[in-house]
Amino acid sequence: MNLASTNKQKDSLENFSPPLKAAVRDGQAYAIMAGAGEGYLNAFSIFLKSSPVVLGIQSSLPPFIGAIGQLIGLWLLQFGGSRRTLIYKSVILNGLVWLPIGLIPFVLGSTEAASAALVALTCIYYMSGGLSGPAWNSLIGDMVPESIRGQYFGVRSRSIGLFSFLAMIGAGQALDLFKHISDVAVGFLFIFLVSLVSRLVSAYWLTKYEDPQHDTINPRNYFSFWQFLLATPRSNFARFTLYISLMNAATLMSGPFFTLYMLRDLSFSYSQLTIAQGMSIVSQFLTMQYWGRLLDVFGCKKILEVT
């Protein structure tokens, strides 16, 4: 057996346990929601004739609310209990919010109230997603053996990238189709309903996860935000957090307005917008599994330094 076939066999989903396979299926369903729904929230806001200021709020406030949701989710973990149950309930809310989002233009039209409703509902979407984040990271960390984490997450991330890209392409084609045969509002409702169903499928696969008992957090491992700030000059974790924050701040300064620029100024169709947005996903899809194997060999720090 040659090296290529050996690597392909190692990266096969069939080599993983049923709970780990379920985590991949969960990720695939989530990716459909993210590609078809979340990927078009800015385009939907533009369709509702939101101003650039509102578009900036739409792109910045909900993720901030989502970060608060992560803090709440982390606080809830201190009480122990079932992490899977916490994740499941958060994911159900995360999926159901797509229905009122899709109904906005039918109820409120293209008004300031419609733009405000979209911002509010997107905040709920990000809040519910944030609530499940710490519990999911903790649970998947217990589920995946350390020896195969790079390989497993390479396979999972590659699969997520593929499904996200296909969903994004399909959603763009659907919007263009509805634009010609009916109404773009109906097209947005359609892709948001697809997102709702996909997230509920994701919730189903979450029930197939292992659910080991989670102990309460050791007080010695807890620190407050103020303690985190004081430790920044001498803490590797604090410096790494600052690095990630600055990277995100730099990219998000102009990020919210690319969709506005492409749709209004360059007059892109929804299909052209999809292609432009999908290139990063294609790049991840083509390379993710190889990064996973390199992580297993060299470790995260080496790879981060090189990249």
Image (cartoon, rainbow, N blue to C red):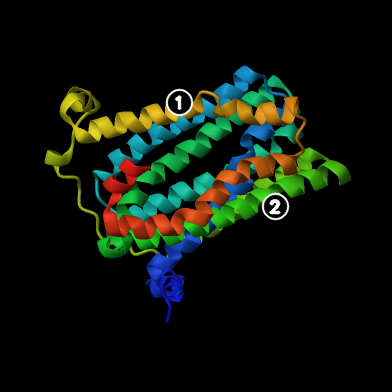
Rendered residue at 71%/44% (across/down)? 189
Farthest-out residue, right? 181
Residue assigned mark 2:
170
Residue 90: x percent and y percent?
Answer: 45, 47
Rendered residue at 57%/33% (across/down)? 121
Image quadrant containing the N terminus:
bottom left
Label ID, residue 180? none
Viewer can see residue 227: no
Callout 1: 10 Å neighbours few (<14), some, many (20+)?
few
Rendered residue at 51%/35% (across/down)? 124
Q: Nearer the viewer, residue 231 or 247?
A: 247
Residue 269: x percent and y percent?
Answer: 77, 38
Which amino acid lies under the numbered mark 1 shown in the image of this protein? Ala
Classify residue 7 by image quadrant: bottom left
Is residue 21 shown left or right of residue 228?
Answer: right
Q: Is residue 104 above or below residue 299?
A: above
Q: Is residue 64 above or below residue 219?
A: above
Viewer can see residue 135: yes
Q: Nearer the viewer, residue 245 or 58?
A: 245
Which amino acid lies under the numbered mark 2 shown in the image of this protein? Gly
Rendered residue at 66%/45% (across/down)? 192
Is residue 182 shown left or right of residue 32?
Answer: right
Q: Nearer the viewer, residue 106 or 34?
A: 34
Q: Earlier in the sequence, mark 2 or mark 1?
A: 2
Label ID, residue 250? 1
